[in-house]
Amino acid sequence: MNIVLLEPTEIRTDGSAELTDVRARHLERVLKAGVGSTVRIGVVDGPLGVGTVSDVSNSRVTLMCALETAIPERPRVDLLLALPRPKVLRRLWAQLAALGVGQIILTNAEKVERDYFDTHLLQTIGYRPLLIEGLQQARDTRLPVVSVHKQFRKLVEDDLDTLCPFGRRLVAHPQPDAPGVLAALDDQPDRVLVAIGPEGGWNAFELGLLEERGFAPVSMGPRTLATTTACIALLTLAHAGLHSSHSGRFS
Amino acid sequence: MNIVLLEPTEIRTDGSAELTDVRARHLERVLKAGVGSTVRIGVVDGPLGVGTVSDVSNSRVTLMCALETAIPERPRVDLLLALPRPKVLRRLWAQLAALGVGQIILTNAEKVERDYFDTHLLQTIGYRPLLIEGLQQARDTRLPVVSVHKQFRKLVEDDLDTLCPFGRRLVAHPQPDAPGVLAALDDQPDRVLVAIGPEGGWNAFELGLLEERGFAPVSMGPRTLATTTACIALLTLAHAGLHSSHSGRFS
């Protein structure tokens, strides 16, 4: 936890916030925060700031919050992901939020098992705490916008242009002549939506539909990666491709 | 499992190999392999090839192995990693092997807890199956060379030049003016050794010693990532930086 994230409703009109949950325990036990200590804070989808501990009593920590005026930029990378199995999904949420994703669009595909959709990890109450955990790790406040789509074709044909009207579209596909992610972002588009298939890959229909709707195939090289590793690798390359300042060579 | 890896000793002089373990079950149950089926195989630290099923009986699968002559190139990225806690390490082994690492050098650091070294995951019998799992995922045969060092200073001052005599050395460090990984590999060195600290970071002494021994600081941007995510992200960028053909733009 590298910042403490607060919900907007937790900050009272006098700028104070009272924590009683795991965040209070983290402040007390890990950060050894006492009255007068300052900690980095943020407001979900709002600004970063600094909290000064004004009271610690009965497992309750009170912070006086001083917030910046600017709100962190929404991450410029979006993810379209064939729903992985719940065990993988559970570990993925925090990592995706930590890497920075504007939107997480989960979809069905032929090689996605139907019962994957039954997991509580697709309900807000299931995934939101995990996303918050990732944001607190990465010192970001911008919560990824999540949507779940049980019909791949409807998603791609009808909904995607509304969900993601702008930006480059890439689909990871092991195709020897496909360019790498960095090459595909050579012209520095404003945003990028990266599509990652199920463990067994997209089928021909799905890949065809994606290409028809503007997704350009990109290759990750000859190594086949498991979903978690592939997501982290692709999002990392997408960020490196967009943010010229990260590499110094894309200016 | 995208290839079945065999130990060199498992291949008999007539080119056959008999599998009775989890690989046999995978061939039978997941791949539904019967007599005449072909499967992609590889020999640990040896060539890739094709196995033709010649017999299936009593949970025993016999393959006739046709091996290529060339051996895959050893990955040109090495990793120096402050030992993470066992739970993290357990998940990391396969992912590191899948991403491609020539050498994994695990070290102590101030912020590494002493008892992390007690885990069976640091013994060959503990980690080797996990590395093999990662290679089978990525269709590679080159097993990362692992070494464990309880004395950071001795490692860096005395042993590192023998372990890694060639190549660029980078240390991930959140320093605003440090270049990104891609920029630091702009001149396409032959190999790169990436150092990743413990969750709390390297201390000043450790960072100083690394810099003294040729490690140039690189930044991953403003987001602080957990060890697993950071390892995957850094290794991905290191590969992208070295392998110009992956991106098409580094030629």
Image (cartoon, coloured by chain):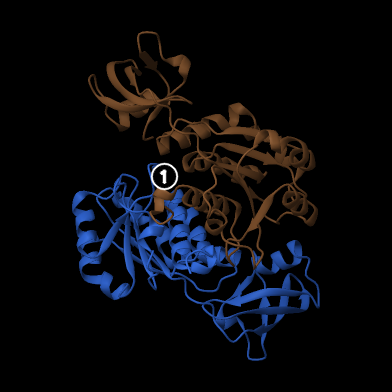
Chain colours: A brown, B blue
Task: Relative to A26, say whether B65 is above or below.
Answer: below
The image quadrant that residue A52 belongs to is: top left
Residue sitting at x 46%, y 53% = B233
Density class for disc 1 (Cα within 10 Å; few <14, some 14-19, many ≥20) is many
Residue B30, given in percent of the width and then of the height, sits at 74, 61
Total marks in image: 1
The x, y position of residue A50, in whole percent, is 31, 24
Disc 1 designates what residue?
A: B225
- Position above or below: B246 against B66: above
Task: Pick the quarter of the image with the N terminus of chain A.
Answer: top left
Could you tell me which residue is drawn at 55 percent across and 39 percent down?
A93
**Furthest-bottom residue in this view:** B13
- Left or right, A86 with respect to B193, comes to right
- Residue B181 visible to the viewer: yes
Q: Residue A198, can we see it?
A: no
Q: Chain of mark 1?
A: B
Task: Please indicate whether residue A152 sits to the left or right of residue B155 in the image.
Answer: right
Q: In the image, what residue type sits under mark 1?
A: Leu
* Residue at (39% x, 73% y) in the render: B190
Of residues B149 and B182, the one drawn nearer to the viewer in this rendering: B182
Q: Is residue B1 left or right of residue B36?
A: left
User: Is B2 in front, or is B219?
Assistant: B219
Image coordinates for residue B7, horizontal then vertical, percent: 56, 77
Residue A77 in the image: state x and y as whole percent.
54, 43
Q: Quadrant of residue A165?
A: top right
Q: Secondary structure at mark 1?
A: loop
Residue sitting at the far top? A13
